Amino acid sequence: MYGFGPPLVICPYFFESFDGDDPFSDFMAALTVGRRVIRYDHRGVGLSQREGAEISIRALDRDLGAVVRAAGLERFDLIGWIVGGLAAMSYAALHPVQVDHLVLYTSFVTGTEVMPRAALNGLAALSRTNWQMASQTLVDMSGRATDPDLNLRQAEILRSGSPERRSLRF
C-alpha cells in the first residue's frame, strides 16, 4: 500500500512482481498523490505462492477479493491493464456495489484479441522450452523503450519474479 486517501486497487499487469526493481515506480508514485494505492503480486509469482498456482479467472477473482477484504475496503476504484484487465472486468461485474470506477488500459478478454491462435501457441511453446528467450520476447512485444536497457531490465524482473512458465497457456 502506498499513499493516503480514497483507495485505488491495481490488478497485476502481467506475471511480474513489484517487490523489487519496478520499472513503473514513477507512474505508481504519481498515482499515490491523494490516494491510497493497493497492489499485489499476480498469482504464482513474486511473493505469492508459486507451486500449484491455479491460473484461472475464478482464481484471479478470489485473489482480488482476498486483497480487498484484507485491506478492509468497502468501495474503491479499480485499474486493470494488460493481463490484469480481465480480473478487473470480472471483479467489477461480479461486485458492482464495491467498484466505484473501473479503468482499463490495453486490456483484453482472450489472447486471440491480441494475436492469432497460432502465434499464441508458438509463444506458449517458447515459454515452456526457453523461458529466458520467451520472457525477453514478452517484454519486447510491449514496445521498445527509449532507454536501451529498460527492456533488458524488465525481462530480468519478469524472470526473477516468476517461475519458468512451462505450463503457460493462452
Image: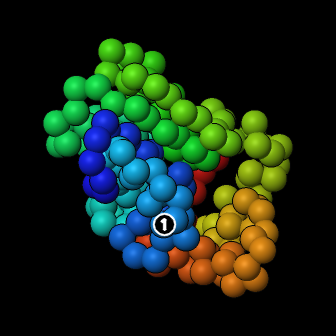
Residue 132, picture quadrant = bottom right
| In this rendering, position of residue 20 left or right of residue 98 | right
Instruction: Indicate the position of residue 89 as horizontal and vertical percent values.
Output: 51, 28
User: Which residue does the image show at 16% across and 36% down from the upper left?
Assistant: 72
> Which residue position is annotated with label 1?
25
User: Which residue does the image show at 28% across and 41% down from the upper left?
Assistant: 5
Q: What colour scheme has been applied to the protein in the rendered image?
A: rainbow
Residue furthest to the top: 97
For the residue pair 143 and 161, the one nearer the viewer reads as: 143
Amino acid type at circle 1 is Ser
Q: Is residue 70 visible?
A: yes
Which quadrant of the figure contains the N terminus?
Answer: bottom left
Q: Is residue 162 visible?
A: no
User: Which residue does the image show at 83% across and 43% down from the upper left?
Assistant: 116
Number of residue marks: 1
Residue furthest to the bottom: 149
Instruction: Indicate the position of residue 144 as horizontal and vertical percent values.
Output: 79, 69
| In this rendering, position of residue 58 left or right of residue 113 | left
User: Which residue does the image show at 60% across and 74% down from the upper left?
Assistant: 154
